[in-house]
Amino acid sequence: MKNNKYFNIENIIKDVKLNQKFPFQSIVINSKKFDIKKKINLYNNNKFSNYWLLRDLLIKNNGSISEIKKNLYMRYGGDEIAHKILDDLELKDKLKNYKILNAGSGFGSDLIEHAYLLPNSSFIGIEYNKKYADLSCKIVHSLGLEQRIKIYCADLSNTEDLLKIRDKEGLFDGVYSNLAVLHIKNKNLVYENIYKLMKENTKFRNEDYINDSLTDIKFAEEKIGCQNLKTISEMYEIAEQVGYKNSLFEELTNSWKIFTKERAINYANLRKKKSKIKEDFLNDVSYFFSLKNGAGGVFIHTK
Ligand SMILES: C[S@@+](CC[C@H](N)C(=O)[O-])C[C@H]1O[C@@H](n2cnc3c(N)ncnc32)[C@H](O)[C@@H]1O
């Protein structure tokens, strides 16, 4: 047995306990391709995220929403962004039964927030990392939301995977993605695949990093796991080629500069035991925005 954190006995026992307590799991669409290390090396190491912390919280305390929420987000904005996403998608009617897709759902933070904001709607997450996909299901289960939030473990850049999901779920009233497309090399394919899952006149909101032409692409690839970052006009072109009839972009670079700096400082100042891998990662992201011309914002594409 490999001698690393995931494969030690203590961890196996914890996983069994967690599965017994919350048996809800992600639906695996195409298991043979889930080599996370090859695809996005960054996500092969759970130490840079709050994976272990969230798992321990679930085992210990039946999932207190405030404790879990504090550690759920992998990006800036928290609840505020969850509201903004629904505004941008024009999906705000609490009485309606929308079907909403989150592409690259991570630990499920936005899906959970949206399930509270839209109590009659249902939600689907697509997440490539099996460990995140399963953990998000258990978080959802601990909050009693498993009837309204379903997670598929699938690859957004794989057309077959997404068409299988469309066969099972039908078309969506809105799609959003937060900091996931930046990790995927073939952005045309992701845009095309998502387009096929949308109803006519609905919106795809993609919060993403971009290449502002001065961006240090090598740093972005090596340190942050970005692949093939595009300029705003290149993204517009992709959207137009795919068939989206209208695209908008809202710049968020300055907010990210401030947020990533504060986040790195706060983490470095924590007194309790820290993960060196996470500390280095947070410093790299902050450095990217302050000195390596990192840039990004929100695209809104209408089908
Ligand atoms: C920075 S995290 C953001 C997670 C979440 N959207 C949030 O805002 O907290 C990016 C997520 O995208 C997922 N991802 C990357 N490539 C993917 C792909 N090809 N298909 C599905 N998910 C992918 C990663 O596994 C990761 O969980």
Image (tube, grey):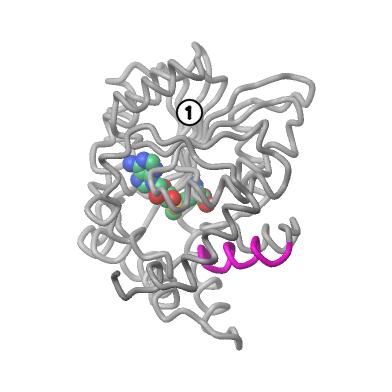
Secondary structure under the numbered disc 1 in the rendered image: strand
Q: Seen from this angle, which residue lies furthest bottom?
A: 271
For label 1, the crowd category at 10 Å Cα-Cα, with few meaning under 14, some 14 to 19 and many 20 or more, is many
Whether residue 181 is visible: no
**Is residue 97 shown left or right of residue 238?**
right
Looking at the rendered structure, the kind of residue marked 1 is: Phe
Total marks placed: 1
Which range of residues does the magenta coloring cover?
A: 50-61
Secondary structure mostly seen in the magenta stretch: helix
User: Is residue 158 found left or right of 153 in the rendered image?
Assistant: left
- What percent of the width, then of the height, locates residue 256? 49, 59
Q: What residue is shown with label 1?
A: 204
Residue 6 visible? The answer is yes
Instruction: Examine the rendered structure and indicate whether residue 77 appears above or below residue 162.
Output: below
Residue 52 part of the magenta segment = yes
Is residue 274 inside the magenta stretch?
no
From the viewer's side, name the closer residue of 24 and 212: 24
Image height of 282 relative to 254, above or below: below
Residue 41 x, y percent position in the rendering: 28, 59
Position of 271 compared to 287: left or right?
right
Look at 74% across and 56% down and name the residue there: 65
Task: Please provide percent x and percent y for residue 224.
Answer: 33, 61
Residue 63 vertical position relative to residue 90 in the rendered view, above or below? below
Within 8 Å of ligand 1, the CB of disc 1? no
* Quadrant assignment for the C terminus: top left
Residue at 73% in and 58% down: 62
Q: Residue at x 60, y 23 (%)?
A: 99
Looking at this view, is 34 or 248 the one in front? 34
Residue closest to the eye, 41 or 133: 133
The x and y percentages for residue 131 are 44, 53
In this image, 126 relative to 23: left or right?
left
